[in-house]
Image (cartoon, coloured by chain):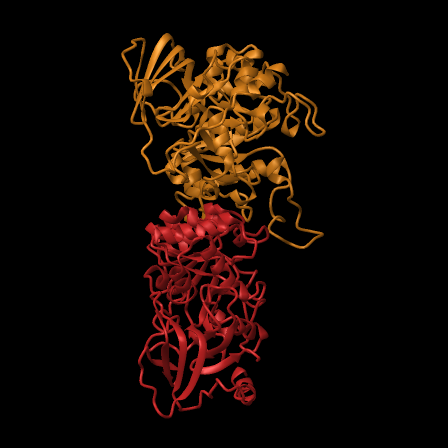
Amino acid sequence: MISILGLVLAPLVLGTPTTASAGESRPLAIRADRVLLADGKTLSPGVILAEDGRITAVGSDVDIPKDAAVVEHKGTAGAGLIALHSYSGAPWEMRDSTRTVLPDARVALAFDPARSDFEDALEAGITSLVLAPMPVALCGGISALVKTAGGTVVERDAQLSLGFSAQSLRNDRFPTSYGAAIAELERLFEKPEGTFARAASKKLPVLFEVTSREDVARAVEFSARHGLAGAIHGAAWAGELAEQVKSAGLSVVCGPLQVGEERRDLLAVLALAKAGVPFGFGLDAPGNHPAMLRTGAAMCVREGLDRATAWRALTSEAARIAGAGERVGALAKGMSADIVLWSGDPLDLASAVKAVYVDGKLAWEAKP
Amino acid sequence: MILALALALTTVPAHATADRSGQEPQKRWTIFADEIHTSAGRTIANGTVVVNGGKIALVGTGREETPEKELLKVHAVTAGLVDASVRIDSDAKSVEQSREVSPSVRVADSLDPFAIEWDRQLRSGVTTVLVNPPDFDVVGGLGVVLKTGGPESIAARTVRANAVLRGAMGSQPSVGNHPAFGRPTDFYSRRPTTRMGVEWEWRKAFYDAAASQHDPSRAFPGSDLVLRALSGDLTLAIQAWSTQDIRTAVFLKEEVERELGGRPRLFIDAAAEAWKEPQLLVRSKTAVVLPPFPMAAEGNRPAGRTEDGAFMTLEVARLLYEQGVPIALSSHGAAGIESRLPMQAAYAIRGGLPFEAALEAVTISPARMLGVEDRVGSVEVGKDADLVLWNGTPFEPSSRVVGVLLDGVLKVDPRAHE
């Protein structure tokens, strides 16, 4: 559906002088004043070369093929942003309140790529989203990493969602208590089968859904006990337990952070960075506006977070947490050509998105 | 009420400990006290307690030269207080209501080590507590004995995991339950709605657990724990406020001894009306934990009345003590200043309980009921260095807690009050 839409829109966006068509077989070359790399370095100027949806070269002096469609950009080019934990495309399909253990439920099979949520995300420079089961079950299912254009599923088995918060307890079905919830999860992981066996052998990362510091403590203990890999999501103050999270080898999905967030929440993100805990940012769109992804990261930078760390949290680290660090999240050879052209530094809130390329194709462009 | 107000001031601000700063806290202390109330049968005048590495290293009368920074001088020392009935952060999420009998649910899994109430308990002198699940089920699960301070982790604070199998008699477990007809079926439809039903669930649990030894089809989730309670390997703690419910608990114990050959170790929690038939408790060797004295009217409940309409006066502790019933005083999880544990000892003394017995009822007596008397509950060499420092004779209206040591770490510093 999106691809059809794309074809319809294509003639409209071709009219602008700085833009060339990402033609079917023609290579795409973007020459920008600054190109942000995943390691925090910047090329200025730099060239990104892409073909068949993938980046073939990034550098200061890349030979541009004669047949390439060349885009000259007076600004900054960076990898598309990646939002962790969202409900775009099917906000009410990602929960099943009648059963509490659904290890084989897949969000990848239950979202609508044509919903306008995705267009909103593109507009904010987000090229991939993790769609997650809602945290209302002991095991809500498996999250997926999807592109915001074209309905492409990048990773069908991103994370197994495990509910460690009071949200997974209800008073009208089992379990109503933390004690029984933990006991049930212990039972499922004691002699794990199927999806749980894949999680127990670290083939499938888990996502611990939490809402409080004691939930974080429980999740860390559980993860260590069963040798799991994955991330913790939902506790504003997970950073205050950064050392424990670090020693359990877990990552953290921060936020979503709101404008006017308590300073304590932002300092917790800094504590994660200081302890060396890998983290990315959640979004919880469509309830939360996609523009908040970059805003939240910028608020952390304002509080003292290192810019390079913030940038990685928005791109490469988020991709790694979603199990797709080799495919998306960085401007490097072999990666998906998901590129955002910014008017300036993306962590400067005065900068605007000018154009978004997904899989080497122009997916969104600011109206002149 | 002046007494209440005076003792209300027994809490003082806790001093920041080195737990979070990364520095090892100082763990060697020498305490000079005019009175050391040991809870071990003696009171030492002008005594010394030396604490080292988290344990009590010396209790005596000698006063050796001590470096200034290791020396604390106070009027009195007691053991850290032990509360055998506490509900810090234990709420609806701590009890499994999809089943009426849930022996294997651990309240420890639901607790918040960061809750401010731990520190409040610690500052009032309470260093060890039994946390119970709330009594929404007939058999609610496993209680845990915890220190009220230390590392911010429930596991690290645990003195005894799975310390008691906890349940209740009386009206509370059946509140909210309803018959299956006349409204949509949910899992509250099949639960007991009367005292008789509650008692039946208890007996069924014991008989099924006993039968499961030769008939596996009678087993149920947690029946192994009920078997352990039957054999006395796991302490049984039953809440029963009124005479009729205390009787039911004692009769249940006697029945399973007679019919199933069990030897359960039972204590009755919240036994407000235990004073009415103390011979029943003596006969069945049952200890009791008393709820806080109902000093003031609360809501539509007059002073003197507790839950389930049970009546209790200040003399109750003395009456039970005189009959030889082992007693512990408790806050029963009430957060009000009047309900705190040191207050209960003061009330019991006012009701005629001798000082020594009141002290034991908030230290070594509950420690014994919980099976942790080898570690806490008295000032004796080798025990955990959990100490309360007082600026006067403990439980007197003009006295207050000025210092608290937990595992040898100074949590409340008496020097801040000099």
Q: Residue furthest top?
A: B45
From what the image shows, is residue B348 above or below residue A77?
Answer: above
Measured as percent of width and height from the top left, residue A56 is found at: 33, 81
Q: Position of residue B396 (x, y in %)?
A: 53, 12
Quadrant housing the N terminus of chain A: bottom right
| Of the pair A282 and A333, the residue shown nearer to us | A333
What letter labels the chain drawn in red? A
Would you place residue A272 above or below residue A205 in this image? Answer: above
Colour for chain B in the figure: orange
Quadrant housing the C terminus of chain A: bottom right
- Tell me which corner region of the image, top left, top right, bottom left or bottom right, holds residue B46: top left
**Residue sitting at the far bottom:** A67
Q: Is residue A49 visible?
A: yes
Does residue A66 appear left or right of residue B302 in this picture? left
> In this orientation, which residue lies closer to the viewer: A331 or B392?
A331
* x, y percent for residue A95: 55, 63
Q: Position of residue A85 (x, y in %)?
A: 48, 63
Is B107 in front, or is A328?
A328
Residue at the (48%, 61%) spot, across then down: A282
